[in-house]
Structures are given as C-alpha cells and as structure tokens.
Amino acid sequence: GENVEQHPSTLSVQEGDSAVIKCTYSDSASNYFPWYKQELGKRPQLIIDIRSNVGEKKDQRIAVTLNKTAKHFSLHITETQPEDSAVYFCAASGSYQLTFGKGTKLSVIP
Amino acid sequence: NAGVTQTPKFRVLKTGQSMTLLCAQDMNHEYMYWYRQDPGMGLRLIHYSVGEGTTAKGEVPDGYNVSRLKKQNFLLGLESAAPSQTSVYFCASSSRASGVYNEQFFGPGTRLTVL
C-alpha cells in the first residue's frame, strides 16, 4: 500500500518568514495530494490540494508543488502569521482512500 | 447543512466495556471513513465504506467493528474496550463524484479514554 513520509515533525518560524513542509510518497499510481490544517482541538480541514497533472498550485499565501518523478510534494506558506500555527498533514491518494503523513506542528512566533 | 457530525464528543470507558460511536453526514456522500488520531501518528484508517451495506478494513481494524445500514450513517463499535484504544476518533465522508480527487470532509471528533 501507499506510504507517506512527512518532514519536519515540528517547525518554528518567525512571523513574516516562510515555512516549507515536505512529503514523499511510495505509490506511483497516486494522483491526488491534499493538505489539511488542524488547529488544536479541532477537525482537520482541507487548505489546498494538487492533482498529478499540475506541478504547482497557489492560493494567496499558500502554494503546493509536486514532483511526480521524484514522488515528493511540498507545502509553502509565505508571510506567516500567528494564526498559521497548527498541525499540517499531507496525504496521497490513487483511489477513494487517503494515506496521511504523520503531521508537522508549525509554530509561528510573533 | 450540518456536514459531518459525531456522537458523542467525549466518552470515558472502563476496560472491557463496549460502546458505539455514531457518524452522520447530510451531504449524500457515498464514501465514509473512520480514523483514529494518536499523538505523533497522524490519522490512521480503521474501517471505511464505499456505499450502504458495504464495509472494508483499513490500516488498523483490530478491536473495531462497523456498520453502514443507512447511507447517511456510519457506526463504529468497540466490543471490549482496551486502554490502547484511547484516542481521538474522526469520521469523514467524500463523494464518489469526485472520483480519485477524494476531498474528505471531517467530523468534529470523539475523544475516547479507556481506563
């Protein structure tokens, strides 16, 4: 089955700096790569996703890149703000199942 | 639309007790999932269902059973709870129409403690 590795497990950045979270996957058949944000005590919520037929997608301060050859994808957050502090999960899917990474706890220091 | 709801929000059990967690969705989604979330382990799939009357095992199914008698509901059962089942349980659903681009919508979670 699919295996998703996510790094780093924790990340601290100064407010205004950029944050990058990286994931690798094992199944070359995977073609959908969502990112979820989970605030403390809340449910995971989709913030951005990318499909295998594109290499990059942006939504305001958030961007995701995908390298299918290398089987890795990354989340980039620019101009970080305190409200970006949360746990971020990457996931990969080739069907109706998602396989999640173990998460990255992002702390934005004011 | 309430989206995905879960009942109860919190529960404390003693070892050996049984309970059922209820997930309901009002989005007419075909697919439903149960995950458990433990510190540092991410979200791990317990069981899932691709339609009414069908269920299948996920990554960590042992000690759990599920049923999907109605399209909108997905029940997770613990027949004899163990301390290792202390966790936060999330239900999720997604639409078959989205195909492999499987955006899953999550419920608010159930925090279960087994003493």
Image: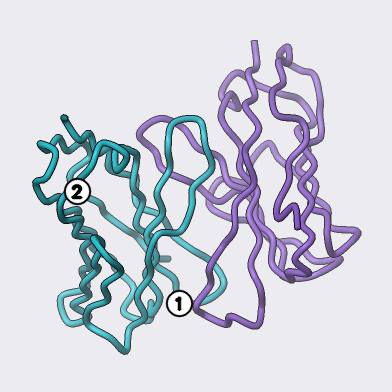
Return the x and y of residue B53 as percentages of the image width and height.
Answer: 86, 65
| Colouring scheme applied when the structure was drawn | by chain
**Rendered-image quadrant of the N terminus of chain B:** bottom right
Tell me the subunit letter for badge 2.
Answer: A
Which mark is on residue A3?
A: none
| B25 versus A102 height, above or below | below
* Residue A72 sits in quarter: bottom left
B50 with respect to B46 (left or right): right
Q: Please state which amino acid type lies under the numbered disc 2.
A: His
Tell me where residue A103 sits by quadrant.
top left
Among the chains pictured, the one given purple colouring is B
**Toward the viewer: B49 or A74?**
A74
- Which class describes the residues within 10 Å of circle 2: few (<14), some (14-19), or many (20+)? some
In front: A25, or A8?
A8
Secondary structure, mark 2, is strand
Chain letter for cyan? Answer: A
Q: Position of residue A61 (x, y in %)?
A: 23, 60
The residues bearing labels 2 and 1 have C-alpha atoms spaced at a distance of 21 Å
Q: Mark 1 lies on which chain?
A: A
Residue B83 placement (x, y as % from top left): 60, 18
Q: Dividing the picture into quarters, in which one does residue A47 lie? A: bottom left
User: What residue is pinned by disc 1?
Assistant: A94
Residue holding disc 2? A7
Residue at 76 percent across and 30 percent down: it is B8
- Work out whether residue B27 or residue A67 is closer to the camera in this orientation and state it: B27
Q: What residue type is labelled 1?
A: Gly
Give the x, y percent position of residue B35: 58, 46
